[in-house]
Each structure stands twice: as C-alpha cells, then as structure tokens.
Amino acid sequence: MTIRILAARDRVVMPWKNGGGVTREIAVFPPGAGLDIFDWRVSMATVSAGGPFSLFPGVDRVLAVLEGELTLRFEGGPTLRLSAASPPAAFPGDVPARAETPPGPVTDLNVMTRRGRVYAAVTRLDFEGGSVVGAAWRTLILAVHGGLRVGHGGAVHALKRFDAVLVEQAAGEPIRLEAAGSGSAYRIDFHQVGRQAD
C-alpha cells in the first residue's frame, strides 16, 4: 500500500488548444503517460468560454462541476445542465460534445479511463464529522472544501481545498475522512477490467 499527497499548488497549468480554458492534471496512470496511452487520468479544468470538447477515441469520461454551472450538448443526444449540486455525468469520450457556460468561469473535475482496461466510479461524499470508505485497486480522494483529513493505517494527512490523496495497492483497506464540521470530497475508485477482487 502506498499513499501519495497531490497538492493543488504543485499542479501545472496548461491552456486548451481552443483557448477556452486551462487544465491542471491531478494524477495519471501509468505515471507520466501522455494523452494517447494513459489507462486513467484525473484533472481539473477552468472553463472560461464555451466550445467543443476534445475527442478521445476509446476513452470513457466522467465530469463533475465543482464551481459554477455548465451545459453539455451531445451530438444526436441529450443536453445536460450541471452545477456543483449535480451528480457526476458519465459519457463516451468519442461522442462529439459541446460545453456552454453562463457568465463567469466554471471549475470541473474530469476523470478519463481507457475503455476495456479500467473503469471508474466517481462519488461525491458529503458528511458531518467523519466517514469511512473502502479503498479500491486505486482510490483518489479530492478535497472539495478545505480542512479535510484523510487517515489510512496510523497516518493522517491534512488536505487543503482541491488537494488530493491517491491510495494505491490497498484494495478493501479502510480510509478515514474527517472534517471539523461538514465536509465534502470526491472519491474516485479505479477498477481493472476483468479483475474479480479490487
């Protein structure tokens, strides 16, 4: 079992090709993998203008809005209106989609997995005081509000807003989440396709 703290302050800001926003990579597997070869990737984006999503053939996506509001329009499909109160939206990365934003930037969480290799379960956690969750093959916890403490084994890690912790090789192990008052976070569990026990 290993634990990695992924501090928000250490993330590199990269502009989008269309100029409509910027992205910050939180974690990728295998480590250092580019956009064409990753098994999974987690990032945050700040969207300042509407525009088309990049296409990712063979990739499944989950998107959650952390701040602001966002409208997703899918070619030949539904229109989704998302806010920080909405559940995460899952969709294929190879279906053309367009994002529209009201005045003001939007911050979102993006989870991408390589279809046929890995799949992800993305859950928003809202709790009072503390909560215990079980780890998967890989589990990433993103703090939505500051003051979150994450415990595993005998160690406790303090997270500021948008910091994350990645727990690896700890399937079934308990992860403790604690906040001084009400807390919220996103839990992302990655599972290998074809593996019976994560």
Image (cartoon, helix red, strand yellow):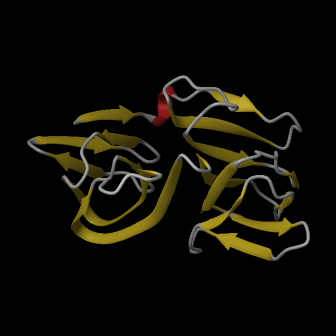
Instruction: For the N terminus, give its image quadrant.
Output: top left
Q: Position of residue 46 (x, y in %)?
A: 70, 46
Q: Residue at x 25, y 59 (%)?
A: 134
**Quarter of the image holding residue 181?**
bottom left
Is 154 displayed left or right of 191 in the figure? left
Q: Give the residue displayed 47% in from the left and 61% down from the top.
A: 121
Spot occupied by residue 73 in the image (x, y as percentages of width and height)? 85, 68
The foreground one among 85 and 54 is: 54
The quarter of the picture where residue 168 lies is top left
Q: Residue 56: percent from the left, percent from the top?
A: 76, 45
**Measured along the vertical axis of the image, is residue 108 above or below residue 5?**
below
Front residue of 12 and 28:
28
Q: Image height check: is 124 above or below 2? A: below
Above or below, comparing residue 33 to residue 125 in the picture = above
Camera-nearest residue between 142 and 161 = 142
Query: Whole-percent x and y of residue 155?
Result: 14, 40
